[in-house]
Image (spheres, grey):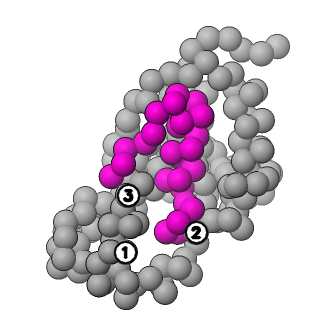
């Protein structure tokens, strides 16, 4: 039987540099950035995120990144867990399969933004989604591009397709 009701939706925001970007960015890229962000959507008692292994989930706050730096309430959704799981399975077979992951152009933040809009009609904070273009617009960002292009992030968790 399908659930009915309203379910809170949050975006968890992690700084994968644990504060190093805040300290080093003025010297390295010539402008201040507050962090290098990984995001996840929390709904129906689980944290959902995207990486090189595809769409994954875990108990909220239990990724290898530790607790989130910020939690942003996005409101609530009427989408029941069963419908949401079907939606994620569809995304995992198409737009957000692991082989489509790209650190700069198609990453966890793009996933969180798309899922947030599906659930609530709201986007995640723009300072998160704008960060890659902000960094790549600097000379140091351009020099790092070849290295960053080759990176794949695998934050752990339970893969929706049953892979670990």
In the rendered view, does 37 fall on the left or right side of 26?
A: right
- Which numbered dot is residue 130? 3
The total number of labels drawn is 3
Q: Which residue is the site of mark 1?
A: 136
Q: CA gap, disc 1 to disc 2? A: 14 Å
Packing grade of label 1 (10 A; few <14, some 14-19, many >=20) is some
Image quarter hosting the C terminus: bottom right
Tell me the quarter of the image containing the N terminus: top right
Residue 102, which numbered label?
A: 2
State which tag comes first along the sequence, 3 or 1: 3
Image quarter of residue 152: bottom right
Q: Is residue 152 above or below residue 73?
A: below
Q: Is residue 122 magenta?
A: yes
User: Residue 75: horizontal and vertical position, in percent?
Assistant: 45, 24
Residue 115 picture quarter: top right
Q: Going 79% across and 53% down the picture, which residue do you hit?
A: 93
SS state under label 1: helix
Query: In the rendered structure, which segment of residues is drawn in magenta?
Result: 103-127
SS label for mark 3: loop
Which residue is painted at 37% across and 75% down in the image? 136
């Amino acid at each position: 039987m399908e659930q009915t009701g309203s379910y809170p939706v949050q975006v968890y925001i992690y700084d994968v540099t644990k504060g190093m970007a805040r300290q080093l960015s003025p010297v390295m890229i010539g402008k201040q950035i507050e962090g290098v962000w990984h995001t996840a959507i929390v709904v129906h008692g689980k944290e959902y995120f995207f990486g090189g292994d595809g769409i994954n989930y875990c108990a909220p706050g239990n990724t290898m990144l530790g607790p989130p730096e910020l939690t942003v309430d996005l409101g609530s959704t009427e989408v029941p867990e069963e419908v949401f799981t079907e939606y994620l399975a569809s995304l995992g077979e198409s737009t957000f399969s692991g082989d489509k992951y790209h650190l700069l152009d198609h990453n966890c933040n793009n996933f969180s933004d798309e899922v947030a809009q599906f659930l609530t009609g709201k986007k995640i904070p723009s300072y998160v989604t704008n960060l890659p273009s902000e960094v790549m617009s600097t000379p140091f960002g351009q020099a790092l591009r070849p290295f960053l292009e080759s990176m794949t992030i695998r934050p752990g968790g339970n893969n929706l397709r049953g892979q670990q």
